[in-house]
Image (tube, rainbow, N blue to C red):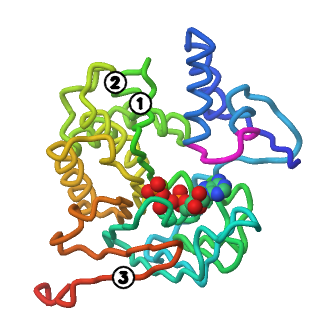
């Protein structure tokens, strides 16, 4: 096993404070899960983070490592096989996403949507082929680079994954507290800004239990974009919501996209995609069977 040393900086201090404030074991477990989600990395890294344990070596997200916004996401002949005895979850997938694009990822259950998102997040690695995200390539990743990358990839899930004992404000502020050396003023400014963006500026003091499902998902979206990601990955963000609320979430995601964030939105709800005019990529049994782009796209802008 690799060993990491968390340097004595704000990240460790903040995580210790956060864990101490949690009243019971259950909440600590949830916080740990949340750290795993934030770091999207192995449990040992998250545990070390939350305990502030120090080992030899170094592993600290480098705020100054460059992320090239202009480079698109690329999958080159990607095959992902979880187990040798079963067919691959993805097979020879080629996909390019330009900076600033909005793409729906559609396909039946088991088609490989979540796997594709996990590969972009570098939570999983391809069995064959290569994934390039904002200039980071799976062929040359180190643990340190992975953390740098993940800090700038926003992710939302169908089950929101909010900390129940934290206010809306604190849920959204958490990535900023964990990943940056921001002042309280900067955090307040940024959190208020993203909450306004998702239309929840007035709910900053509420707790997740006091919110509707749609509002909770909007908090999750605010949290995902708080660190200014270059891409937002949404894995079935409307699966637990009624049609009216789903539309509201999709509109919120579109607003986030218009403000300059690339988006990949996985869904099996074809009705969301049809007639949307947006590009969609359809997976079937691990292969891309359709990659539809409006042939008139960009024409009006010329
Ligand atoms: N960790 C894993 N280990 C083994 N097999 C896996 C793992 N994760 C996914 N799979 C398999 O890979 C295939 C694709 O799964 P994936 O979760 O990517 O599909 P999906 O399109 O997101 O489905 P859904 O719409 O149900 O979320 C499935 O056959 C699934 O059983
Ligand atoms: Mg899935």
Q: CA distance from mark 3 to mark 2?
A: 37 Å
Mark 1 and mark 2 residues within 8 Å of each other at the beta carbon: yes
Q: Label 1's element?
A: helix
The one of 131 and 13 positioned closer to us in this rendering: 131
User: Mark 2 vs ligand 2: CB under 8 Å?
Assistant: no
Residue lying farthest to the top in this orientation: 23
Mark 1 lies on residue: 171
Mark 2 lies on residue: 208
Mark 3 lies on residue: 291
User: Mark 3 vs ligand 1: CB under 8 Å?
Assistant: no
Q: Position of residue 11 (x, y in %)?
A: 62, 35
Q: Is residue 194 above or below residue 272?
A: above
- Residue 301 is left or right of residue 266, and the answer is left
Q: Position of residue 18 (x, y in %)?
A: 57, 21
- Residue 165 is left or right of residue 138, and the answer is left
Mark 3 and mark 1 residues within 8 Å of each other at the beta carbon: no
Indicate which disc, 1 or 2, sits on the residue closer to the N terminus: 1
Residue 148 visible somewhere in the drawing: no
Q: Is residue 33 above or below residue 238?
A: above
The one of 279 and 222 positioned closer to us in this rendering: 279
Figure quadrant of residue 37: top right
Q: Residue at x 50, y 71 (%)?
A: 68
Q: Nearer the viewer, mark 3 or mark 2?
A: 3
Q: Residue at x 60, y 84 (%)?
A: 77
């Amino acid at each position: 096993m690799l060993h990491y040393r968390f340097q004595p900086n704000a990240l460790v201090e903040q995580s210790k404070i956060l864990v101490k404030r949690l009243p019971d074991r259950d909440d600590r477990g949830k916080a740990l899960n949340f750290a795993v989600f934030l770091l999207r990395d192995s449990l040992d890294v998250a545990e070390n983070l939350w305990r502030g344990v120090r080992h030899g070596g170094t592993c600290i997200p480098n705020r100054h490592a460059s992320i090239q916004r202009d480079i698109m996401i690329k999958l080159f002949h990607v095959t992902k096989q979880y187990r040798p005895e079963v067919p691959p979850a993805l097979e020879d997938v080629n996909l390019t996403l330009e900076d600033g694009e909005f793409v729906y990822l559609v396909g039946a259950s088991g088609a490989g949507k979540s796997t594709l998102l996990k590969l972009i997040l570098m939570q999983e690695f391809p069995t064959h082929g290569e994934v390039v995200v904002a200039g980071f390539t799976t062929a040359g990743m180190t643990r340190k680079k992975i953390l740098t990358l993940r800090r700038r990839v926003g992710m939302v899930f169908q089950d929101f994954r909010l900390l129940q004992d934290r206010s809306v404000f604190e849920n959204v502020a958490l990535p900023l507290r964990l990943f940056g050396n921001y002042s309280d003023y900067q955090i307040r400014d940024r959190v208020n800004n993203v909450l306004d963006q998702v239309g929840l500026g007035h709910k900053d003091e509420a707790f997740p239990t006091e919110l509707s499902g749609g509002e909770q998902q909007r908090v999750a979206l605010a949290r995902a974009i708080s660190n200014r990601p270059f891409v937002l990955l949404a894995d079935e963000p409307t699966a637990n919501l009624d049609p009216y609320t789903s539309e509201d979430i999709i509109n919120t995601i579109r607003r986030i996209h218009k403000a300059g964030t690339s988006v990949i939105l996985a869904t099996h709800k074809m009705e969301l995609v049809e007639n949307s005019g947006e590009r969609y990529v359809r997976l079937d049994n691990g292969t891309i069977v359709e990659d539809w782009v409006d042939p008139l796209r960009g024409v009006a802008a010329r």
